[in-house]
Image (cartoon, rainbow, N blue to C red):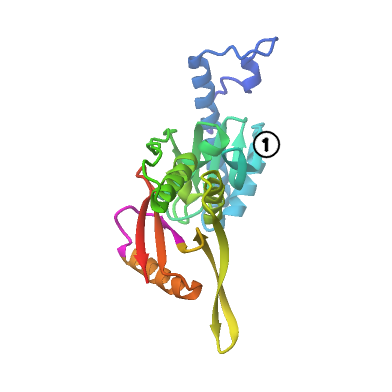
Amino acid sequence: MKQETKNVFKSAAELEPADGCFAASPEQEGKWVKALKARVKEAAAEVYQALGPGFYPPAYKEALAQEFLLRGIPYTQGKALDIIYKGLRVSTAQVDYVVEDTLLVDCSARKGLEPGQRRMMQACYIFSGLTQGILLNFPNKGKTIEAVEVPYTPLKIKAPARPKGKTLKERLAYAADQVHVHLGHYAMDHLDCEAYETALGIELRLQKIPYAWQNLEVTYKGIVVEKRKALVVNGKCLVHLYYEWTPGKNNKRFREEKENLKYNLGLAGLKEGLIFKIPSNTSNVVIYSLTR
């Protein structure tokens, strides 16, 4: 016989007194969140039991939304999260569900959960201000879902000190580290590169470093076959942003990036180039110089 998990509180509102002040003790709130997570897991298990494996994620997501509705679980689907850098929105991220304005839920349908999905959830914590989340995976084989609770881990990136020198490289390193500290290494798996680029542009303006985004044209026998977006700093230095998805690995990919920078220097008619190596961990940004 199917057993229902006892719902300690129907909603967070039941924990509030008449004057609107939140009165639940940490123990009460913990019990409520635990019960809410159990209800979400049960709903997901019901969906997978009914549909089985083999569907793409949208099918499971729509079915889960229906199951939430039938079970009386309040949720927001496809919640857009603003990514703010020093007061300005640089991009948006999206999470599949926000349940009871408390719990983030993200769904996938693959062989198994990957480490990048856990980092993605940490990014959503940063952008949403919430600290509770569950990753649900509806595997393409098997009879049970994967439901992993992701604990919130605060950012531990050391804030950069203002550069003592005034060289362009030192000032750029400081600007890049500012962006990395504010957006966080967790965001690497969830953001498009344009968010980092936009935030870096904001920081360069704040540091009063002249810059411009240019389109470098690759031509073939008089026609343009490709346009490459390039960051030119101080009118003479070409900057590449290199996102290090796996620290200490992908050396081949980094060598290719250096060759790519050399080629782009030729297109831009410049001699000096820099690569900002942006890590996916708590390390600071490393800048590599290259000349043509």
Which span is picked out in magenta? 239-251
Instruction: Decide: is 105 above or below 62.
Output: above
Q: Which residue is drawn at 51% across and 45% down?
A: 207
Q: Position of residue 94 (x, y in %)?
A: 60, 46
Q: Where is residue 147 in the image (x, y as percent from the top left)?
A: 46, 41
Residue 32 in sight here? yes
Between 30 and 46, the residue placed more toward the observer is 30
Between 242 and 222, the residue placed more toward the observer is 222
Between 105 and 218, the residue placed more toward the observer is 218
**Quarter of the view holding residue 74:** top right
At mark 1, the secondary structure is helix
Of the residues shown, which amino acid type is indicated by label 1? Leu
Q: Residue at x 47, y 64 (%)?
A: 236
> Does the magenta portion include 222?
no
Q: Where is residue 170 in the image (x, y as percent from the top left)?
A: 39, 48
Q: Residue furthest front?
A: 166
Q: Quadrant of the C terminus?
A: bottom left
Mark 1 sits on what residue? 70
Between 203 and 54, the residue placed more toward the observer is 203
> Does the magenta portion include 245?
yes
Q: In the drawing, does residue 161 fall left or right of residue 83?
A: left
Instruction: Decide: is 16 above or below 268.
Output: above
Residue 145 in sight here? no
Total marks placed: 1
Badge 1 local density, few (<14 within 10 Å), some, or many (20+)? Answer: few
